[in-house]
Amino acid sequence: MRSSGGFHGRRIQKTGGSTYIISLPKNWVTARGLGPGDVLLFTPRADGSLTIFAESSGPGETERRVVEVDNGMDTEHLFRRLIAEYIAGYPLLEIRTEGRMSPKTREVIRNFAQRMIGPEILEETSEGVILQDVVGANPLPIPSIIRREHQMVRAMHVDAMAAFRTRDASIARDVVDRDWEVDRLHWFLEKQVTSALRDARILATLGLTLPECSTYLLASRVLERIADHAVRIADSVAILGRDPTPDRLAAELDRMSVAAATALSDALDSLDTRDIAKANRVIDAAHELTRERDHILRELSSKRGRLAVGLAYVLESLERAAFYASDLAEIAINRAVESPPRVEEFVSARSAKLAVPATGS
């Protein structure tokens, strides 16, 4: 046996006419309660290595996380803590307090379970609540989550601009409410990636490499940020009130909106197809929007009061949405360089794009 850098080496031996065998380290076998006759499963990975695990053990079957919280904890702080625990990916999450759990704490936990994908209340006691992940590690492929996020973000962007043009507070509120749907998809994707990092068996079920998981997580974060800017545009409706937007300014903001939405779609397409030329066009378009922004800012300098403030919010959010699309394009370039597409992947990506229904209102 040879050891180097924490890795144990074994020589390949040949037995019979065509069978190759290697021995396993004794301490690894005994630490897992294995013995002669037990079956090991092998999962080949994209880098050429093999992951070995025992047949009887499933990923995360007995993992349980106990979290001690305080009844006096700020509700937002508690909610953020629960999100962090959710992303960690434990199948069972037990939240406990010292003594009886307060109704306020219990309400935050119930609200959390209703908003997330997967957690359901399994058991309640006077001192705690146990949540169980009922959907498992891979109920929805990560690329499908990204496409769904894109549909939702694009629809939010379109509706936020509709609310801005018409000063319709009900459409604006709807955009704000839908931001939670994007958030929960992002947190769910982040949970999947975190679980894959912790357990190679989960990574095998995702059908992705670790670099691909990282790429999609970055893409999801970009989409989540663009959704936040759709919310900011919707929030501007309350600031603007009934003050009309000058027609020329409204037309220019509409053009920026269309350009930002197109940049996002093209960036996502370049991520799927690894099209470096298209990704570069998205980045160039974002820089062009900066020049348009400067022109509109000069015109806004002559405005006063809440009209100027509200329009500045819309302008900034449109520009930020375009630059987040350019961030996604840069991620696409990195992915294309790291792993050029195979023919079957290109066909699959194009088919998936054609299958996505049009969104917006």
Image (cartoon, grey):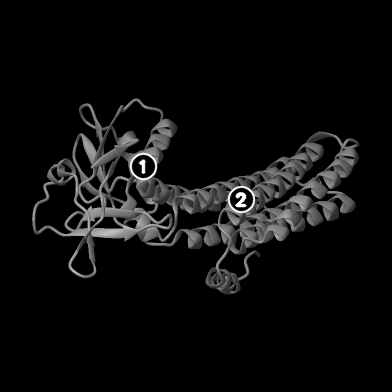
Seen at 54% across and 53% down, the residue is 178
Where is residue 322? Give x, y as percent.
71, 49
Which quarter of the rendered picture does the C terminus lie within?
Answer: bottom right
Where is residue 297? Give x, y as percent.
85, 39
173 relative to 2, above or below? below
Tell me which amino acid carries mark 1: Ala
Tell me which amino acid carries mark 2: Asn
- For the question of whether residue 159 can be seen, the reply is yes
Residue carrying label 1? 88
Residue carrying label 2? 334
Which quarter of the rendered picture does the N terminus lie within?
Answer: top left
- Residue closer to the observer: 159 or 340: 340
Seen at 17% across and 68% down, the residue is 16
Q: Is residue 180 left or right of residue 315?
A: left
| Mark 1 residue element | helix
CA distance for labels 2 and 1: 27 Å
Q: Earlier in the sequence, mark 2 or mark 1?
A: 1
Q: How many marks?
A: 2
Determine the image quadrant of residue 68: top left
| Mark 2 residue element | helix
